[in-house]
Image: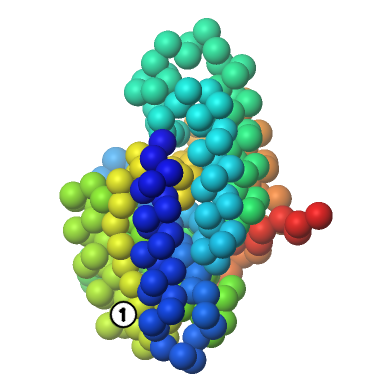
Amino acid sequence: MSFDAIGAFDASVAALGHSYHRDFMPEPVTAFFDESGKLANNEFVCFGGIASEQSNMLAFANTWSDLLIARGLPHFSMKEAMNFTGPFEGWRARTSERDQLLRDLLLSTSQVNRVSCAFSSIQFRALPQEERKAYHDPAYMLFEGCVKAVISRNPQVGIIVTCDLSEEYSERCLKMYHKMRKRWPEIKQRCFALSFADDERLPQLQAADMIAYLQRASKIRESRAPEAVIAEMIGILERKREVQTVHYQERELGGAVITPPAPTK
C-alpha cells in the first residue's frame, strides 16, 4: 500500500479545489466508481462506488489501508478475496479471518457516501432494437445514475470522478463522461474533472470494487445464493439506504441507491 500515492492524489485534488469556479463551495466532492458484470454474459450490470468531501475521503482511505496493512495485504479486490487468489493466495485455511476483514472493510465505508445502481441485462436485451439504440449502453445509464445521485446529494458543489485505469474500462468511461456532459448541462457545470488511477494503489477504488460487487450479488441472490459472509455484507450495505429514481430519456429505468455517512460520535 503506497501512502505516497494517496497523498499525491489528495494534494492534486486539493489544488483543483482552490482553482475552480467561485460559485462552488471550497471543497469539492470526490467520487470513485467501478463496474461489476458485463452485458454479454451477466444477469445484471452494476455500478458502485463511494463519494465524499476530500477530508472525509482521506480519513476513510487511511482506515482502509490500516486494515490491510495489519494483515500484510498490499491491496484488495473482492474477486481475489472470494477466490483466494492474488494477495489472498494461501488464505483458504484463514476463511474466518478473511470474512472478518471483509466486514471490517465494508464497515469502514460508513465514513463516506456509498452509491450504487444496477440494471437487468435481460431486460435491456429484451427491449426493441430502436429502444436499445436510443439507450445505447446500460453501463452508461448506470454511470449517469450514480453521478446524478452524488450531485443531488451535494447541491452547489463540484464533483471530481475517478475510475479504474485499466485500458478498456478507462477508454469507455472517458466516452461515457463526455456523453454525460453533452446530455446534461448541470453535469457539465458540476462534474468538472475525470481522472483514472491504478486500483491497487487507491483504497477508494478498492472500496468501489466492493460496493459494485455487492450490488450485483444482491441482484442475483434469488437465482444464485451468495456465501454467508456476502449475504451478511449485503444486509449491512442495504441498511438506511435512500433510493433515487433514475430516468433515462423520459423512461424510468430503476433506482440509484445512496447511503449517507454514519453520524460521528
Please give left or right for residue 168 compared with residue 225 in the image: left
Q: How many marks?
A: 1
Q: Secondary structure at mark 1?
A: helix
Residue 90 coordinates in the image, percent (x, y): 42, 11
Between 204 and 228, the one nearer to me in the picture: 204
Q: Is residue 26 above or below residue 33?
A: below
> Which residue shows up at 32% across the image and 76% down it?
180
Q: Quadrant of the C terminus?
A: bottom right
> Which residue shows up at 26% across the image and 75% down it?
179
Asked whether residue 98 is in view, the answer is yes
Please give left or right for residue 41 compared with residue 203 in the image: left
> Which residue shows up at 25% across the image and 74% down it?
178
Residue 121 coordinates in the image, percent (x, y): 36, 51
The furthest residue to the right: 265
Asked whether residue 132 is in view, the answer is no
> Which residue shows up at 70% across the image and 50% down it?
239
Would you name the residue on which mark 1 appears? 181
User: Within the image, what quadrant is residue 188 found in?
Assistant: bottom left
Q: Quadrant of the N terminus?
A: top left
The furthest residue to the top: 93
The structure's colour scheme is: rainbow
Q: Residues within 10 Å of mark 1 (few under 14, many from 20)?
A: some
Q: Is residue 228 above or below residue 1?
A: above
Q: Is residue 250 above or below residue 8?
A: below
Residue 196 coordinates in the image, percent (x, y): 29, 57
Please give left or right for residue 151 compared with residue 100 in the image: left
